[in-house]
Image (cartoon, rainbow, N blue to C red):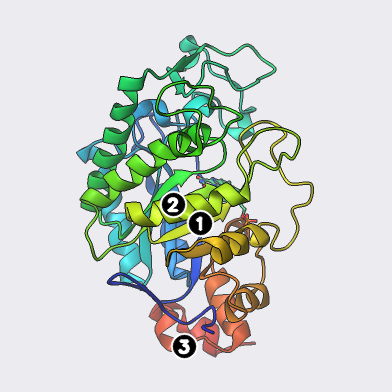
Amino acid sequence: MAGLFDSLTLRETELPNRLMVSPMCQYSVEDRDGLATPWHHVHLGSRAVGGAGLVMAEATAVEPRGRITPEDLGIWSTEHADALTDTTAFVKSQGAVPGIQLAHAGRKASKSRPWEGSEPLQPDEGGYEVVAPTEEPWPYEAEAPPTKKLDTDEVAGIVDSFRDAAEHALDAGFEVAEVHGAHGYLLHEFLSPVTNDRDDEYGGSFENRARLIREVTEAVREVWPDGKPVFVRLSGTDWFDDRDSWTVEQSARLADILYEAGADLVDVSSGGIAPNSYPDWAGPNYQLALAEHVREHAESDIRVGTVGGITSAEQGEAILRNGRADLAIVGREFLRDPYFGLHAADELGDLEDGMIPDQYLRGFHERL
Ligand code: FMN
């Protein structure tokens, strides 16, 4: 079995290793216009310097209503693409592959940043329209502006936004497009019976609930070059066993549908559909069993990435060498240590000169 620092070829795209920086919102757009700033450049660039094989940019809104907060990154115009081209070029110059998570926040849109309380924003605070498969708002404690239930014919507009966003992402120089279908945001809201109360062709049966994410994946694949991979992030489960909800069995079934629609890898996360939709325990590898279930039960050749509680080189290496997933995805450890990739390679005896930037060679060779 391959190790963490073996390359992985997906279509014609070679990841230099199997370590991905998980998409992490930075809430750092300065003028509430969705445009990338120096913060995004340094944040993504330093993780590329730090040895990650794939650097996935945060949940990036496909339309203004799709932003979680007004400070989220967007990719709905040429200007948004232009603001990211230097960053993708820099990531590539460091030997890493740049990816972007294409996202729509659904009923979790239009709120303040986590460090400002994640409260719903009123129109006079810069709040904007919130759309979802249902008119049931997220159950905030504070009063929230109404959530608009998308009409059937408005759903096609969402698919178009993802397709257009993928085109802009390609122009910006990204090599991997990841559709965000997790964490209680719009596409997950259609998948889960917890939030999907529709009686049109986008609600009810499993096939109907899966229709939107399938159509979005097909639309992204339509414009994404054949040689480049498409990922989809899923919540493997809603973590409810006492109500009709999204389960790991449905995730495995969906993985095959997504493969048919053109996806190459599912990135298996979990939860987020409601305030109590979280695991009881979130220690090391806490979502690995979900990824393994999908890997074992999907009948197609779809690859599977695991995320959650990976904080050491040994853990990532063990996941890969034991064949439990195809990609180790690391979030918070990369916030603590932007050079986690280099440190992990060093620990595993896999550090090669080509990975260390010339500017930093003496730091690794002349140790005190
Ligand atoms: N997950 C997403 O799918 N998209 C995001 O944009 C996103 N933003 C995040 C921002 C922060 C600051 C953090 C800590 C997490 C975020 N997540 C997001 C979840 C992470 O990608 C990851 O799945 C989660 O932190 C678990 O992995 P970890 O234990 O390695 O941190």
Mark before the other along the chain sequence, 2 or 1: 2
Q: Residue furthest right?
A: 280
Q: Amino acid at mark 1?
A: Asp
Query: Residue 21 location, x and y as percent?
Result: 50, 60
- Secondary structure of residue under mark 1: strand
Q: Earlier in the sequence, mark 3 or mark 1?
A: 1
Q: Residues within 10 Å of mark 1 (few under 14, many from 20)?
A: many
Tell us which disc is closer to us: 3 or 1: 1
Earlier sequence position, callout 3 versus callout 2: 2
- Looking at the image, do the residues carrying marks 2 and 1 touch, with CB atoms under 8 Å apart? yes
Name the quadrant containing residue 238.
top right
Q: Which residue is mark 1?
A: 267
Q: Which mark is residue 352?
A: 3
Query: Which x, y percent locates residue 172?
Result: 25, 51
Q: Residue at x 32, y 63 (%)?
A: 90
**Is the CB–ligand 1 distance for label 1 below 8 Å?**
yes
Q: Which mark is residue 232?
A: 2
Q: Secondary structure at mark 3?
A: loop
Residue 287 x %, y %: 66, 57
